[in-house]
Image: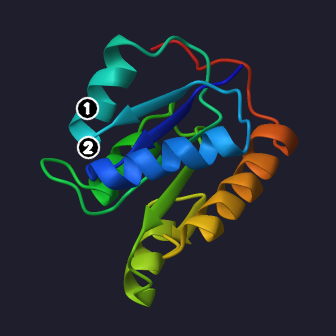
Amino acid sequence: MRTILIIDDDPEDRFLLEIAFSENTIANPLVFLKDGIELMQYIDTKMDTNIPAFILMDLNMPRMNGKQALQWIKSDSRLRCIPVLIYSTSDNAQEVGECYQLGANGYIVKPSEYNALVALVSRICAFWVQMTLLPVALREK
């Protein structure tokens, strides 16, 4: 079962996402990280060769923001196949465009209501966990 990586520095957002995944009975393991630096460390030291189902990542984080982390992931030929979904409060068209130019596989505006979040998690997982085929493993370095 593929892991889902969630990168967000806001403890409340992480908590709400954890509950929303639980309410949708998503069995995939969730790994929560606070910023792009923690993501880099996780990928370099704790992630095996199995590709995560997807990465759900906030944009505005300390140390290394979502755009910088996205650029790092998509510039590495081993990691490029990992689906990265940007999850932000911003719906700024320029920011959306920049994320897609950097290789984002999706850009999602954070819902303002909890029921909408639960429905969103259901739809994300229906596509990225149940329907999408990914390579079996990352290529070796």
Q: Residue at x 38, y 79 (%)?
A: 90
Which class describes the residues within 10 Å of circle 2: few (<14), some (14-19), or many (20+)? Answer: many
Rendered location of residue 116, percent (x, y):
63, 70
Whether pointer 2 and pointer 1 mark residues with C-beta atoms closer than 8 Å, the reply is yes
Tag 1, which secondary structure?
Answer: helix
Relative height, residue 88 to residue 84 (above, below): below
Rendered-image quadrant of the C terminus: top left
Rendered location of residue 19, percent (x, y):
54, 44
Q: Is residue 36 visible?
A: yes
Q: Which mark is residue 35?
A: 2
Quadrant assignment, res 93: bottom left
The residue most toward the right is 131
Q: Residue at x 59, y 26 (%)?
A: 3
> Does residue 37 appear left or right of residue 91 in this picture?
left
Relative height, residue 62 to residue 32 (above, below): below
Q: What amino acid does circle 1 point to? A: Glu
> Does residue 32 appear left or right of residue 139 in this picture?
left
The residue most toward the bottom is 93
Tag 2, which secondary structure?
Answer: loop
- Tag 1 residue: 38
Front residue of 115 and 122: 115
Rendered location of residue 112, percent (x, y):
48, 76
Q: Is residue 103 visible?
A: no
Q: Residue at x 60, y 58 (%)?
A: 105
**What is the CA distance from the residue labelled 2 to the residue labelled 1?**
5 Å
Q: Residue at x 68, y 44 (%)?
A: 23
Quadrant assignment, res 133: top right
Rendered location of residue 56, percent (x, y):
50, 49
Q: What amino acid does circle 2 point to? A: Asp
Which class describes the residues within 10 Å of circle 1: few (<14), some (14-19), or many (20+)? Answer: some
